[in-house]
Amino acid sequence: MSNGSNGASAGVGFTLTEEQKMIQKLARDFAVNAMAPYAEHFDKVPGYPWEIVRKAQQQALTTLNVPEEYGGMGLSLFEEMLVGEEMAWACSGINLCITINNLAALPLLVGGSHEQKAEYLGRLVDGKLAAYALTEPGAGSDVAALKAIARKDGDDYILNGTKTFISGATVADWYTVFAYTHPEKRYKGITAFLVDRNMPGVSVGKPFDKLGQRASDTAEVVLEDVRVPARNIIGSEGTGFLIAMKVFDRSRPGVAAAATGVAQRALDESVKFAKERYTMGKPIYKHQAVGHLIADMATKVEAARLLTWQAAVAFDEGRPDIKLASMAKVFAADAAMQITTDAVQVHGGYGYISEYPVEKLMRDAKIFQIYEGTSQIQRVVITRELFR
Ligand SMILES: Cc1cc2nc3c(=O)[nH]c(=O)nc-3n(C[C@H](O)[C@H](O)[C@H](O)COP(=O)(O)OP(=O)(O)OC[C@H]3O[C@@H](n4cnc5c(N)ncnc54)[C@H](O)[C@@H]3O)c2cc1C
């Protein structure tokens, strides 16, 4: 067993406990029965998959990381990965709608007070949704370029700014918002706030039309002189950047698990198709070029899953590893993009038309290389950690 500083082997065989197998089966059944049959519809027809999200709420799938003391599932990150992969296998867009609360809850789990958790996580347990609002039109990879500003006014703060590309923005009851309280201090001047959707001055744009994960909504959140009480600061003034970085330890394996689910689906569809499709008198998998392509797809799926699980286990064992989380995210995202593209190739012309699910998988996979830090940024993080 290694616990070396290089973040090598998590030292476990990843044998699932009976309880973990049960959680995985619950997610798989939900994915197969309640999500997969509607994936195509929500890809093609605009509209939010409320009915599916409500069903997920009934099974507590929207509060996976909310601790049991606040009424949630209280899953470990590893267990969360099991669930996320299964649901993304069915539809990563609907999965994002179901799991967005996980992301919104993370700043609270990292730095929130008991009162804040009881109130805001409690709302999630009661069936509300929330969103995570960090990105701005001029600040994605470059977090320090944030323009959102929170000016102190008595016991309150007045927030102004525009957040963009916010998943779940149109359906959220509250947002975790990052803004400068002291811009001159750069990273050390960023503060995280809990902002209620119904606070005067909060407005939400129309969902963007996008390439993939179309079941999920992505929109702007505009803050105009929004009066937020000081008690809604998560942690303390100036800790926002640190909180956002700690969120990544947990959120990046989550994205990696979803990417693995999409990649697994592309592999499954390819195996099925390659057995059924005949050319030159034999199923296409018997042409070595196709068989080996699928072998490489399968190998990458396994590697993505193992890296994801390793990052999750490291976190669960109390040694969160930013490098491992970035490695899992970049590897799984890039693998999902490659594997879904190869799945289209395996399907030939049928892969390119929407009667088969693989063109959707390819469109869905692209975003994994962009959100929660682009693939380029993950490599920046990994390099920085290696040479620290
Ligand atoms: C569908 C969708 C959902 C999203 N959901 C959320 C959400 O819920 N909450 C939220 O806060 N944000 C969300 N985002 C925002 C997302 O995290 C950002 O888009 C992402 O971090 C990239 O930022 P950017 O778009 O500003 O690109 P930029 O940062 O402008 O990057 C442009 C290009 O330059 C590269 N680049 C930039 N800087 C460097 C560098 N230093 N080194 C190497 N390459 C670099 C990038 O990799 C990229 O290829 C979402 C985005 C989308 C599209």
Image (tube, rainbow, N blue to C red):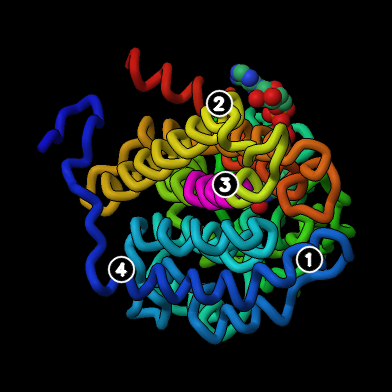
**Residue 95 seen:** yes
The local secondary structure at tag 3 comes to helix
Which residue is tagged 4?
20
Instruction: Give whichever of 379, 87 is nearer the camera.
Output: 87
Residue that carries the numbered disc 3 in the rendered image:
271
The residue wearing badge 1 is: 170
Q: SS of the residue at dot 4? A: helix
In the displayed structure, does residue 328 sit left or right of residue 284?
left
Taking the spot 81% from the left edge, 53% from the top edge, the residue there is 220
Is 238 inside the magenta-drawn segment?
no
- SS at badge 2: helix
Identified at 42% across, 66% down, the residue is 65
The residue positioned 39% from the left and 79% from the top of the image is 70
> Horizontal and vertical percent for residue 25?
41, 72
| First along the sequence among labels 4 and 3 | 4
Residue 366 in sight in this render: no
Earlier residue among tags 1 and 2: 1
